[in-house]
Image (cartoon, rainbow, N blue to C red):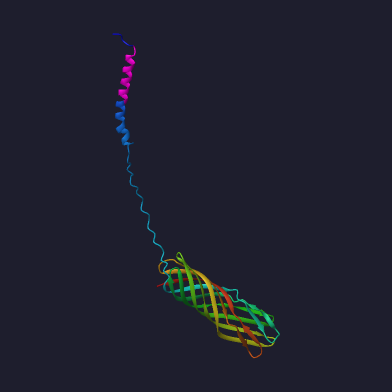
Amino acid sequence: MKKTGSGRPVRSMKSMAALFVIASGMAAPALASGPSTYQYETPPTTYAALPSYAAPDTNWSGAYVGVSLGYACCGRDRVQLAPAPPGVIGSMSEHGAFMGLHGGYDWQRGNRVIGVEGSLSFGNIGDDLTNATASSRVRISPVTEIRARAGWVNGDGLIYVTGGLALGRVAYAAGDTAVPSNIQSTFYAPGVSVGVGYERMVSANWSLRGEYGYTLYRARDLTDGTQTTRATPDYHAIRVGLSQRF
């Protein structure tokens, strides 16, 4: 029998096909299972404990008492003796230091605070004026005030406005040696007092405050039977205070 030269290539192709089928069968399960999934264990994270902070006590409700120091200035009391001469002799500017006691009660609702306060102050508020032969003098002490106040809590502080009535003991003198006249009078003058301030809690039971205020007393006509004058005392004041709360 005659051999053909094409038998070996045919057998080689059959062998390659068989190897391909076997390799495909081995690869199929691996491909079907998909890529391997790895799980990573995250180590627990620990944090150092932060130091505790105690918020300041901002409860303003309740009673309080305290002391205050202040300085008054910038009053304008125009002095005129009539009938002229001398007429207008100038203006007195009441000023001077004072100290006082105060006490009151506050009610807080949310961030709003309303309250009432009374105070009693002693000092050397006054002035002297001389013009040629005419002169005048005024002193105001003590002073009693009763005021309402309303404020807004901001952190551990209280921003507030205040207003009410004042009553001051006024010693007033004016005269002219050329006439002559000598007006002297001591009286209690009612007035109004308004202000704005800031108070801050420094502990659960103590607070510090700073306040600006203006006090105007009712004018009063005075006479010695020869001449007359009109007393119009007023002043601006800055005060600081310390209060204990209950």
Q: Is residue 6 magenta?
A: yes
Foreground of the two, 7 or 114: 7
Query: Measured along the vertical axis of the image, is residue 53 above or below residue 161?
Result: above
Q: In which quarter of the image is residue 179?
A: bottom right
Query: Measured along the vertical axis of the image, is residue 215 above or below residue 8?
Result: below
Q: Where is residue 198 in the image (x, y as percent from the top left)?
A: 50, 68
Q: Quadrant of residue 79?
A: bottom right
Q: Position of residue 53 (x, y in %)?
A: 39, 59
Query: Measured along the vertical axis of the image, is residue 81 above or below residue 163?
Result: below
Q: What stretch is highlighted in magenta?
A: 5-20
Is residue 220 visible in the rendered structure shown here?
yes
Q: Position of residue 47 (x, y in %)?
A: 36, 50
Q: Is residue 24 magenta?
A: no
Is residue 35 visible in the rendered structure shown here?
no
Dividing the image into 4 quarters, which one contains the N terminus?
top left
Q: Position of residue 5 (x, y in %)?
A: 34, 11
* Outermost top residue: 1
- Magenta-colored segment: predominant secondary structure: helix
Dividing the image into 4 quarters, which one contains the C terminus?
bottom left
Foreground of the two, 240 or 104: 104
